[in-house]
Image: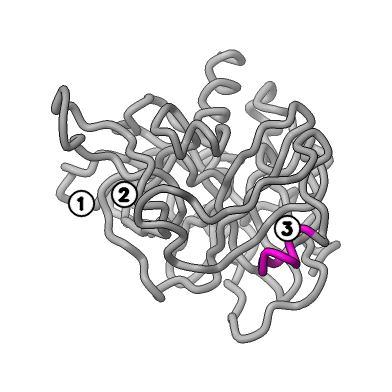
Amino acid sequence: MKRFFRRSALLLATTLSLAIAGALPAPAITGGEPDGDDHPNVGLIVFYGADGGRYRCSATLISPTVLLTAAHCTEGTAGATLVTFDSVIAEAPPSPLPAAAVPSAGYTPEELEAAGYLWGVAETHPGYSNFTDLANWNDVGVIVLDEPVAGVAPATLAPVNYLDRYRQPRLNSTIFELVGYGTEVRKPESGPQKPQPMSYPLIRRSTTSPGQKLTPQIIQLQGNPNDNRGGGGTCFGDSGGPVFLDGYLVAVTSYGYTENCRYLGGYQRVDIPVAQDWLALYL
């Protein structure tokens, strides 16, 4: 179980170089549609690890200076984190995202400012268990920006324990909205015609998913794009992206079950006290 969750989380936030090359990156929206300007407070974050690898995740502005994301998108990052709210990053290769001069040290603020991007510092929930403790998952992180974002209204966090009112049997008939910059799953133009994660276009997408299971820490959603109750789920690159319900941000993308993103998705609840008490330190 421990090994499975570690691997599934890495699939959600894998190296950007692999994602752009078309190999296995970090989970993204399956099904759904290009988001356009529907969720302008959902952004792409890009960062380096100490190993010199470049990674990407999704995040949501929850105050003028704070973005909410997953802990596995903030823990162990090197240097500054790139932030952009552009809905379309690249329709086709190459990606315009800059490379750090010293990958093992990560981005510097000066590099990102020169390239025209926002930047911030990653912080990780102190109770994050790195997927080793189901009762204390705490896959929550933030990016604290150097300066406030102008012209973008922050998302509203759900009230404490808001999801508790959606327990079964109500959960299965409840439809959640998902947003992120992950890979689209579709048939390739050539070769075996099996749906698979595709690296481009690198854009913000959104979809809908019905509820499946609710625990004190996690909500699971059905990610099947052929389910007539919803439009799909999350895939590689959607890690840290928001789950919305009734206009509230209730969870962030945490893990997936399959490499083609066609099954259940796991989402860290952010309506619970252990998450909101920590987030209050930054709001």
Number of marks in picture: 3
Do we see residue 277 in this rendering?
no
- Residue type indicated by callout 2: Pro
Q: Residue at x 82, y 60 (%)?
A: 109
Q: Residue at x 80, y 37 (%)?
A: 127
**Display coloring:** one colour
Q: Is residue 230 above or below residue 219?
A: below
Secondary structure found at label 2? strand
The location of residue 256, given as percent across then percent down, is: 45, 32
Mark found first going from the N terminus, 1 or 3: 1
The location of residue 70, given as percent across then percent down, is: 64, 45
Q: Which residue is mark 1?
A: 229
Q: Are marks 2 and 1 in contact (CB under 8 Å)?
A: yes
How crowded pointer 3 is (Cα within 10 Å; few <14, some 14-19, many 20+) is rated as some
The location of residue 108, given as percent across then percent down, is: 82, 53
- Is 129 on the left-hand or right-hand side of 12? right
Q: Residue at x 73, y 53 (%)?
A: 81
Q: Which residue is mark 2?
A: 210
Q: Which residue is mark 3?
A: 276
Secondary structure found at label 1? loop
Picture quadrant of residue 41: bottom right
Q: How far apart are the alpha carbons under marks 3 and 2?
A: 24 Å
Q: Is residue 69 above or below residue 7?
A: below
Which stretch did the figure color magenta? 111-118
- Residue type indicated by callout 1: Arg
Q: 120 or 7, which is in the foreground? A: 120
